[in-house]
């Protein structure tokens, strides 16, 4: 697993983009976060003004989790496979939200608990069926961990080679916020009780089972907190490992990413540990209501673009944020400058305010 | 000025829309604010599922303000007319952001400080040149106030009769955050010092002049705080009065509105006073960095959709929020139900969690 060659977004283009924002027909800084986002996209693309995204792509990583058999979720495990089919046929939230944002969706069966993937294409990168119950055993073997990270890298390469110019990772898997909380705890040192949320809406008894499972998993990982691959193996899952490989490889390939919710952000924490500097190629699409999400984003130094009390996963929060990123690109690409529009800049007013009024 | 016939969004459709959100293939409530917004659009349209917006329209109300001659802005007053031309030729932020969100833009010269409006169409509803310096005199006469509110109502009617199914009001006018702060203070009783911000970026001396002007204007209005028309006349402006008429008339005509920044929200406070209940037809597009904005939105009971540190006006913040509203509509209009997708709902899991685990 060698990600040492993570490049840096282009600093010269970043400066040029910031300078261009300052001569567009609006007060300097008046577009707020849009200005920062536009400058980031330009630096990632290495060109100013930046190009509007023409192939924004959501990849949903589906996997089951052995721990779901212990009642940590409000939904039964068979929903994972059912939702893979729903995404494949276009009826899930991510299909609708991606469509609304001008993005397309691919769903990948990394570790769904079924022998027969829904289709050859969906199962092409399958690593295993489900994962071990992380409360009592590792999620998977060392070989499977490497295979899962490699699958994620390969999927990123496939998408980028097909022309993807913006990537979003999404998650689908009943019980996946349990390994997510365990991974975030192991990677950041934060207490499980501060990180465990309601996921899809588990009740109090389920929340207690979930917190206990997270504690047990984190305890089993106590001697491996410096090794992201070991953590993915001990208290993560094949889907999380594949997402980590995908996010790291996007950075290696210089393609910007919008992160989604808490599950993807847990994978992002692992990816940043595997490939330091990769996070410069990511923005946080949204903040979910899962308590671990804001903490994990803060750990990565990322600020969410929208905060709409969403808690669905699938890439849905990132898809809702995508039009904001498109709007940011559009300002730098299409607004007139003061000179072009023959609008007086504030220098004229500074003369004025020096005069008696 | 009779707006007594403000209707209410359809309560039966609201209930039907909420019930439909609960059977779509995602945990109940997992789409957060998107669910609330989708239900609101359905209730406004009186149909579930709601229709996607086909003619979202931004109307930018341009006007100058006599108080700008006293150095309350970082920009010279001639920028208002220059920016009207920039918007008309498509180079301003609002053109680019509206285009990115699938909306079109109209700019109206309500009270720009020029004799010759840029075009007949732009000047069709012109009320007067600029407005009085509200620190020492009324912004306009009673007749002009009625003419300005009527102009706004007429513009709303024109747009709705042309098929607009979502309206956004925007502002353009050097110095307009000064009457804005005065209006908000007079309408809410909040202290000027808590409301006055930097506008386009005025320096400390300018901020002091601005705060003094607001205090003087609010003092002149002290006996008229129960009369929104009087307040628009004494410490507002023709552009603000036109926006108030526009926002109230959109509600009368049952057309949903996304509010923009602090200037539009000041007009909205006056419109809600003129036409009680109108605010049920509005959502707050964004929260700007102007301190008065969050306070005015709270007074209206509205929660911003995005918070991106924008402070431009023109309708720009609402335009950036529009894709979120579109995404919300899309969920209710296009997602599969549990039944349609043959996905197990949580009832199955509730059986499970009752079982020993």
Image (tube, coloured by chain):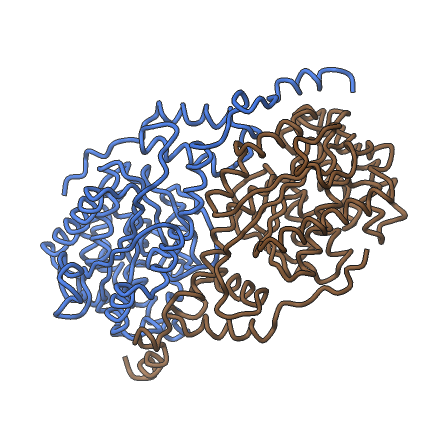
Chain colours: A brown, B blue
Q: Which of the 4 image quadrants contains residue B256?
A: top left
Mark count = 0
Residue B336 in the image: x percent, y percent?
Answer: 50, 28
Is residue B179 left or right of A94 when viewed as pictured? left
Q: Is residue A4 above or below residue A271?
A: below
Q: Nearer the viewer, residue A242 or B327?
A: A242
Residue A3 x %, y %: 77, 60
Q: Is residue B215 visible?
A: no
Residue sitting farthest toward the right: A223
Q: Is residue A2 above or below residue B268?
A: below
- Percent from the top left, x then y, of residue B112? 20, 66
The answer to whether residue B117 is seen in the rendering is yes
Residue visible at 52% across and 75% down in the picture: A16
Q: Residue furthest front?
A: A120
A134 or B153: which is nearer to us?
A134
**The C terminus of chain A is located in which quarter?**
bottom left
* Residue at image location 63% in from the left, 55% down from the top: A161
Q: Quadrant of the N terminus of chain A?
A: bottom right
Residue, x 36% and y 43% (percent of image)? B300
The residue that appears at 33% across and 81% down in the rendered structure is A348
In-image side of B294 versus B32 (left or right): left
Among the 4 quarters of the image, the one containing residue B131: bottom left
Q: Position of residue B154 (x, y in %)?
A: 16, 47
């Amino acid at each position: 697993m060698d990600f040492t060659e993570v490049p840096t977004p282009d600093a010269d283009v970043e400066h040029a983009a910031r300078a261009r924002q300052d001569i567009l027909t609006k007060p300097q800084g008046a577009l707020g976060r849009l200005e920062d986002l536009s400058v980031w996209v330009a630096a990632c693309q290495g060109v100013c003004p930046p190009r509007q995204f023409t192939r924004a792509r959501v990849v949903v990583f589906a996997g089951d989790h052995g721990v779901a058999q212990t009642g940590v979720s409000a939904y039964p495990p068979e929903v994972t496979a059912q939702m893979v089919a729903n995404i494949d046929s276009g009826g899930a939230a991510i299909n609708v939200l991606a469509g609304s944002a001008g993005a397309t969706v691919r769903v990948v069966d990394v570790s769904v608990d079924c022998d027969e993937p829904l289709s050859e294409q969906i199962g092409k990168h399958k690593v295993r069926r489900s994962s071990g119950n992380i409360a009592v055993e590792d999620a998977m073997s060392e070989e499977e961990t490497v295979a899962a990270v490699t699958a994620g890298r390969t999927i990123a390469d496939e998408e980028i080679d097909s022309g993807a110019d913006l990537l979003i990772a999404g998650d689908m898997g009943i019980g996946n916020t349990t390994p997510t909380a365990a991974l975030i705890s192991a990677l950041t040192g934060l207490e499980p009780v501060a990180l465990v949320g309601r996921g899809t809406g588990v009740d109090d008894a389920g929340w207690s089972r979930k917190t206990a499972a997270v504690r047990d998993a984190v305890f089993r990982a106590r001697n491996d907190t410096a090794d992201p691959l070991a953590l993915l193996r001990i208290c993560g899952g094949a889907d999380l490992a594949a997402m980590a490989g995908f996010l790291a490889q996007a950075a290696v390939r210089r393609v910007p990413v919008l992160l989604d919710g808490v599950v993807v952000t847990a994978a992002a924490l692992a990816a940043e540990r595997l490939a330091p500097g990769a996070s410069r190629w990511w923005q946080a699409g949204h903040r979910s209501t899962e308590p671990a999400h804001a903490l994990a984003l803060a750990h990565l130094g990322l600020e969410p673009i929208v905060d709409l009390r969403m808690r669905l996963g699938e890439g849905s929060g990132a898809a809702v944020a995508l039009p904001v990123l498109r709007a940011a690109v559009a300002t730098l690409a299409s607004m007139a400058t003061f000179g072009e529009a023959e609008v007086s800049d504030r220098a004229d007013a500074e003369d004025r305010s020096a005069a008696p009024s």
